[in-house]
Image (tube, rainbow, N blue to C red):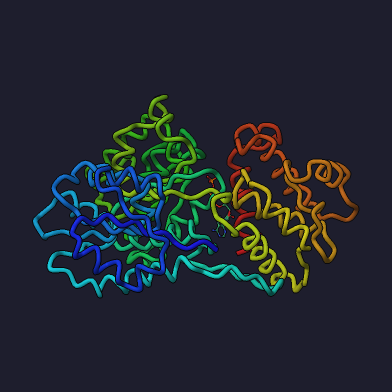
């Protein structure tokens, strides 16, 4: 396994030599900065896990540029400064960038930070027991790759603050799980975690679903109803697919975020809200803003802390580990001993998983159903992996297969065919989008962990 990478941008020769003498530094692959170039640009290219930066007055642009840069969440920063007040640096530290050491420096205290990060990054990837999961877990997330450890550190940093977070990533990468994890490791963990899918809100009831209503507010309002803001009071409100919220409601949401107040439909009094908002989207945000699908001002309100959810293809080694993990949990559920053959694991490792963890999880679920004891490559049904096998296995439905399994396969296959588009999938299957969401939710909750 390659070594974690450390970026060093230090002008003071004494400080540099003290740092270079640390054992904690020597265990990394070292990238020393070209002093004449912006350290942010160099870092964006070298993609190091840890960055030691000695800040000087000429660094304003780099510090400013880092505030909304994905590197902020991917890299552990150790800043060194002379101690003169620097609002931009303060802002970065508040956003969880890492540590700020002020002169005179005690470089020995840097050692423990470096060791901690190094240990997290150097997880051995040994696979030995086919009946067990061997991946690391943080909150509800499973994965041992560097990308996942970087994500765990980011979540830990955001969790301790009260800021809103915006999770950006492809469909199926685990954005809801990240939001839930952020909640359970935060001081709000005792409070509720409430998730809504902004794409599935019914247009007639959206006000009431968000802000609640009082008895008699409209025909059919037989009793008071709590909206999601009230349900999530003291906890976390997860706004999934926030970019799909109707444009006019985005203004309402923005107002609530700005004022911290909302009014249930038909109520006289406003209510104060105390929730952390975590939003998510799998859209390319710049496109959504440009195409007037999503309001830029709302984006800035929500994205106090952007969190990137890495695609599965960027989590080295995790695909096989997750397959093993899902299978181990499924075996435990049914008291079974099914195993993945070596060639199946090889295929899993080679495939790019465009549908990410969801696709992998569903592939294992289907393979588990189809295989007697050993899961062979032909049991692993995904369009790209084995389209011929898919046709054979699912067009001629095996005798005795449970009806709910047949339904599941039909839904997942149609979803896959529509590249994840739920509206088209629901239309083709002749069910409402709400029913589709309910069924997908049910699969996610009952399949495995
Ligand atoms: N790191 C992980 N460890 C374990 N399970 C995971 C992980 N990431 C995702 N999953 C599982 O994959 C499925 C999809 O995850 P999730 O719904 O959180 O993805 P998403 O990014 O929110 O998808 P979408 O954008 O389509 O809503 C879920 O069943 C979830 O439990």
- The one nearer the camera, 391 or 78, is 78
Whether residue 26 sits left or right of residue 340 in the image: it is left
Residue 172: x, y in percent? Answer: 57, 48
Residue 434: x, y in percent? Answer: 58, 41
Whether residue 238 sits left or right of residue 133 in the image: it is left
Going by the picture, which residue comes out furthest to the right? Answer: 399
Q: Is residue 267 visible?
A: no
Q: Does 316 appear above or below 436?
A: below
- The one nearer the camera, 111 or 307, is 111
What residue do we see at 66% from left, 73% from top?
132
Whether residue 89 sits left or right of residue 308 in the image: it is left
Q: Does 224 appear above or below 299?
A: below
What residue do we see at 21% from left, 56% from top?
54
Residue 379: x, y in percent? Answer: 80, 54
Q: Does 137 appear above or below 362?
A: below
Q: Quadrant of the N terminus?
A: bottom right
């Amino acid at each position: 396994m390659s070594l974690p990478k450390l970026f060093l941008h230090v002008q003071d020769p004494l400080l540099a030599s003290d740092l270079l003498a640390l054992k904690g530094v020597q265990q990394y692959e070292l990238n020393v900065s070209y002093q004449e170039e912006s350290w942010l640009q160099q870092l964006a290219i070298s993609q190091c896990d840890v960055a030691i930066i000695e800040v000087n007055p000429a660094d304003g642009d780099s510090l400013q540029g880092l505030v909304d840069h994905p590197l902020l969440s991917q890299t552990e920063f150790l800043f060194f400064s002379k101690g003169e007040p620097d609002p931009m640096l303060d802002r970065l530290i508040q956003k969880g960038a890492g540590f700020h050491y002020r002169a005179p420096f005690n470089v020995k205290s840097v050692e423990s930070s470096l060791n901690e990060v190094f240990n997290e990054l150097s997880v051995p990837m040994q696979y030995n027991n086919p009946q067990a999961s061997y991946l690391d877990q943080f909150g509800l997330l499973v994965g041992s790759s560097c990308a996942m450890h970087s994500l765990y550190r980011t979540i830990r940093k955001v969790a301790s603050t009260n800021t809103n977070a915006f999770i950006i990533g492809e469909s199926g990468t685990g954005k809801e799980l990240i939001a839930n994890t952020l909640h359970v490791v935060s001081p709000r963990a005792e409070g509720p975690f409430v998730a809504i899918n902004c794409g599935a809100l019914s247009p007639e009831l959206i006000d009431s679903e968000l802000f609640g209503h009082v008895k008699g507010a409209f025909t059919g309002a037989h009793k008071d109803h709590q909206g999601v803001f009230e349900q999530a009071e003291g906890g976390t409100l997860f706004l999934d697919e926030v970019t799909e919220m109707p444009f006019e409601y985005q203004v309402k949401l923005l107002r609530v975020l700005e004022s911290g107040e909302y009014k249930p439909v038909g109520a006289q009094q406003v209510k104060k809200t105390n929730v952390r908002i975590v939003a998510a989207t799998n859209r390319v945000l710049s496109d959504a803003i440009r195409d007037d699908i999503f309001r830029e001002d709302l984006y800035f309100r929500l994205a106090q802390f952007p969190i990137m959810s890495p695609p599965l293809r960027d989590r080295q080694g995790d695909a096989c580990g997750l397959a093993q993990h899902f299978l181990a949990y499924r075996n435990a559920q049914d008291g079974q001993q099914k195993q993945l053959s070596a060639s199946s694991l090889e295929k899993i490792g080679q495939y790019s998983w465009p549908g990410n963890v969801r696709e992998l999880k569903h592939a294992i679920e289907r393979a588990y159903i189809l295989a007697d004891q050993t899961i062979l490559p032909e049991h692993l049904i995904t369009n790209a992996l084995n389209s011929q096998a898919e046709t054979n296995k699912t067009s001629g439905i095996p005798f005795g297969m449970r009806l709910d399994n047949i339904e599941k396969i039909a839904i997942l296959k149609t979803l896959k065919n529509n590249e994840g588009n739920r509206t088209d999938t629901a239309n083709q299957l002749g069910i409402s989008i709400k029913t589709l969401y309910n069924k997908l939710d049910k699969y996610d909750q009952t399949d495995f962990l």
